[in-house]
Amino acid sequence: MENQYDVIIIGAGVVGNAIARELSKYSIRVAVIEKELDVSMGTSSRNSGVLHSGIHYKPGTLRARLDVLGNSLMADLCNDLKVKMNYLGKLTVAQDEEEVKSLYILKEQGQANGVPDLAILDTDAMRKIQPNVGGIKALHSPSTGIICPYSLTIALAENAYANGCHFYLGHRVTALSKQGDGFDVTASGKRFQSRVLINSAGLYSADICAMLGINDYKIYPCRGEYLILDKRLDGSLKVLVYPAPHKGKAGLGIHLTNTVSGNILIGPSNEYQDDPEDYACTARIMALLRKEGHELLPDLKTADFIRSFSGLRAKQTSPGKGGFEDFVIESREDVTGFVNLVGIESPGLTSSPAIALMVKDMVAKLLTLKRKETFEGTRSGMAGYFHQLPDEQKADLVSQNPDYGEVVCRCEQITKKEVLDAISNPLGVQTINGIKYRSRAMMGRCQGGFCLPRIVQILEKEFGYNPEDFLLKSKDSQLFLGKMRQDVV
Amino acid sequence: MQVIKRDLVIIGGGPAGLAAAISARKNGLKDILLIERDKILGGILNQCIHDGFGLHTFREALTGPEYAQRYIDEFHKLGIEVMLETIVLSLDNNRQISVSSKEGFVKIQAGAVILSMGCRERTAGAISLPGTRPSGVYTAGAAQNFINLQNKQIGNRVVILGSGDIGLIMARRMTLEGATVAAVFELLPTPSGLARNVQQCLNDYDIPLFLSTSVFELHGTDRLTGVTVASVDETFQMIESTKRFVPCDTLLLSVGLIPENELSLGAGVNLEATTSGATVDDTYMTSVPGIFSCGNVLHVHDLVDHVSEEAALVGQSAVRYVTQKTVRDSASIPIEAKQDVRYVLPQTVSGKTDFTVSLRVTRPMANGVVMIKDKGRKVAGKKIVRLHPAEMIRVKVKAKNIETAEKLEVSVQC
Ligand SMILES: Cc1cc2nc3c(=O)[nH]c(=O)nc-3n(C[C@H](O)[C@H](O)[C@H](O)COP(=O)(O)OP(=O)(O)OC[C@H]3O[C@@H](n4cnc5c(N)ncnc54)[C@H](O)[C@@H]3O)c2cc1C
């Protein structure tokens, strides 16, 4: 039957897609069901994009083990998937002797977790790495890295798809039931069956559990807001710089984070809220982030703030309790065949390849997994963007394909070819944001003021879009209501 | 890679670039190349289908495309070389330019360069607008493109934030096209657009303008459902008790223009904080020898007529630079903005030739005199009945009056 699968994965975030790609190495039928019109519309595109080294997690926890393993798997994975990442390293900086003590504790914890090459640096040594950094000593963790989180999430999905995994985008799972050996899944009115069901629904993971009568979990969304800075400031930070943990200071604190695209992020904040869909940015936090930004980067100008966004942490700890719980990754004994992932908050992005391996082992106990000889783990294309290539190579590519010569997005220098590739990606694109996340067009300082009208023209002339077909991100987010004037016949 | 040579390269084929090219040719220069990234010349004027252009230059109220066409026709008649659909990727301080087009990658060595890239609109991100990120939020210029050039209906019930000229023009356009414009909100206590636009685009259509009022939150997860607005006090802080929800499906932003100086910065051109444009001398040469700037990339103008006039002067200066290898006079005289003056241009003058100072005032005033002084001595002045930040003021200065000047100061006296 068409909608019958060996494994159904709920949620096309980085975790669901990493699992899908891992399982696509085996001769089983796998599908991913996602409520949004594209992959990576939830937490997986709304985070700091840091590949954490693993110094912060309690030894023996899943977070510690999976983070360190995930971090070490990332280089090869990104190489295969053509995703840009960079192990640029991090300094955790102490301001006084009290904080220096905490650096040694962190270092010991990191070593227990297997984090490589940790070193405590004195002022001179740390300033060699990041000039002008304040503080007296720092813990250097060279394996801390940065990655574009949605590029990874999209690449995982595309590669899973290329290896036979099915994707049902715009399908919200509304009902689940255990039927004999398998599961009945209802999503947007369509029925599916599967033998194994994997819950990687992020903020909705507890709701998915509840659909199967499991009421052990509750998710408390906790919002982190960010401001994105103009690329002009790229280069102000050589490495990531975090303050040392300090009694009375909660979380990792608001800080600056480099991104692989050269825009620095300020954030994230830390505010519990009720609605798992409310990605609003608030006046109060934005003002706070602006103030922090000016303190951390004296050269910052008002015009350097190009956009704000927020992400929601899928926390298991209530607002009163705070802190962190370990990831829940379990093959349920009471509901055989249900592999359940709950509370995959930070470092879920870093851990995703390791989580996928762990889940694969769980699935192997439920189904026979046979390696597929046809599996192709590498993705074609390039990591990064056309404009980053050397001039000679660019000239070559333009002579092969003139669409590389036409720059559509002037701020990010994204070419028409890259926009066309984004539109014709294997999973298809249904939204303007889908084009944006894949091509980087509209992500620059003018925020699409220049290129959105051009992209609209491309979609209309070359892909036959009608005015009503243009969606920003969801099916009710039309760009246009129709034609302004009727055509004269 | 191929490197071609040109005496003068003009970057940007809007009204500034066109007028500069025409003037350079009329001043005798043959080897001129204009580079434009669009398919057609004319720049932003192509989407400005309303009238009011050319009142000074042609004594006629032309539409944007009509105004542009007069220059485009002349440009072609003069047989000036143009590269269309070609984007300049970089410019260095030796005036080497790299460009990209469907034909490929080319490097161009220019004897002189005129920067005329225009400006871009300030966005919701740039003004840190809180709330959700739904569809239906456009900058006024992008909306103008969609409606006038692409026949798209962008919304039914519109709120406009900012009273810049494009916002005012779009209030009228949306009304004419059958949408309802609920209101225009302006943070400042005075409109930022021209008085004639407030009259002809808002008052004539009974569209309310709320001054000292701004949008404080966007609502709606998919399409915009409304905005929270409130009045502000003198320090621009929101007055909590005035907060109200205004339902709308469209928000247009007309909150300022930013000169597009990324290429200029790459070449090491010094910019001025107030204008966000280059600092120039009275030949409109920037801090980098042989690189000139004019039009909205230099400072945001009120009228296209002023752009054309300035660009013609710059075309002439560039020709002089190319043919006479003029160097900057080291003994130049700085000009500074003082009392009630937001900025002045040029920032330095040689004092050897007559010149015109362009300036804007900081606040609306009546019956003022714009004074240009050298150590307290008046060297030029102009009486103006109505002074407004939305309007550019131009004052002529005679070289013979500043023979001994060390520094000029520009102020307004009421
Ligand atoms: C502010 C912030 C900063 C962070 N920084 C980092 C960092 O620097 N490094 C790091 O390693 N981690 C970081 N994280 C954590 C990381 O982003 C997450 O752990 C990771 O993205 C979780 O991925 P996921 O696939 O579980 O969730 P998601 O990306 O949320 O995916 C879940 C998917 O399930 C879909 N779904 C939900 N319900 C249904 C349903 N009923 N039917 C169908 N589909 C459904 C959702 O639409 C969504 O697409 C950060 C998180 C936040 C919030």
Image (tube, coloured by chain):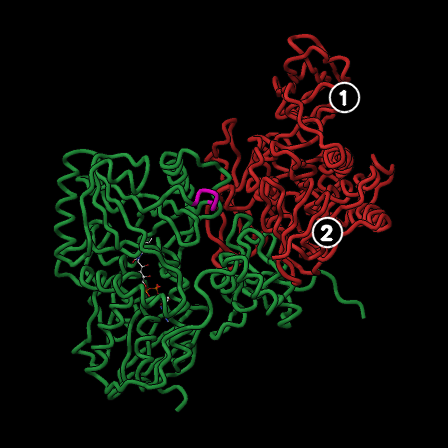
Chain colours: A green, B red
- Residue neighbourhood size for the residue with mark 2, other residues' Cα within 10 Å, grouped as few (<14), some (14–19), many (≥20): many
Q: Secondary structure at mark 1?
A: loop
Q: Give me the residue at 43% from left, 42% from top.
A: A283
Kindly tell me whether mark 2's CB lies below 8 Å from ligand 1.
no
Give the percent coordinates (x, y) of residue A479.
58, 60
Q: Is residue B367 above or below residue A117?
A: above
Which quadrant holds the C terminus of chain A? bottom right
In this view, the mark in front (2 or 1): 1
> In this orientation, does residue A406 appear?
yes
Name the residue carrying label 2.
B47
The answer to which of A274 and A132 lies nearer the viewer is: A132
Q: Image check: B372 left or right of B260?
A: right
Q: Estimate the x, y position of residue B360 in percent, counting from the top left.
A: 66, 27
Q: Which residues are magenta?
A: A230-234
Which mark sits nearer the N-terminus, 2 or 1? 2
Amino acid type, mark 1:
Thr
- Residue A86 appears left or right of B183: left
Mark 1 crowdedness (10 Å alpha carbons): few <14, some 14-19, many ≥20: few
Side (left or right) of B179 relative to A439: right
For the residue pair B254 and A440, the one nearer the viewer reads as A440
Q: Which mark is residue B353?
A: 1
Quadrant of the image containing the N terminus of chain A: bottom left
Residue type at tag 2:
Gln
Q: Determine if marks 2 and 1 fall on one subunit.
A: yes
Which chain is mark 2 on? B
Q: Do we see residue B299 in this rendering? A: no
